[in-house]
Image: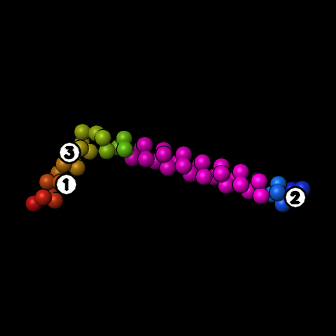
């Protein structure tokens, strides 16, 4: 499959780099979805209730 060790190492590096890029893209997507869920009117009201409860 590989002619020499250098080709194998390069292929391994490229595969690992692609995996890291995919993980980073998945993390960005997860953060963007999570932020959008907490921005609604109900979400703000619920968070405000929590802070008031913590102060008492």
Disc 2 crowd, CA 10 A, few/some/many (<14, 14-19, 20+)? few
Name the magenta segment's main secondary structure: helix
**How many marks overall?**
3
Check disc 3 and report the residue beneath it.
45
- Front residue of this view, candidates 22 and 5: 5
Quick one: which residue is furthest to the top in this view?
A: 41
- Residue positioned 39% across, 47% down in the render: 34
Instruction: Give the image location of residue 54, x and y in percent.
Output: 16, 59
- Front residue of this view, candidates 52 and 11: 11
Check disc 1 and report the residue beneath it.
50
Instruction: Give the image location of residue 53, x and y in percent.
Output: 14, 57
Residue bounds of the magenta highlight: 9-34
The quarter of the image holding the N terminus is bottom right
18 drawn magenta: yes
Question: In the picture shown, does residue 46 fall above or below 54?
Answer: above
Check disc 2 and report the residue beneath it.
4
Q: Secondary structure at mark 3?
A: helix
């Amino acid at each position: 499959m590989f002619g020499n060790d250098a080709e194998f190492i390069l292929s391994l590096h490229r595969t690992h780099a692609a995996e890291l890029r995919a993980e980073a893209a998945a993390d960005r997507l997860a953060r963007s979805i999570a932020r959008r869920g907490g921005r609604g009117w109900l979400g703000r009201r619920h968070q405000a209730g929590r802070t008031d409860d913590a102060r008492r």
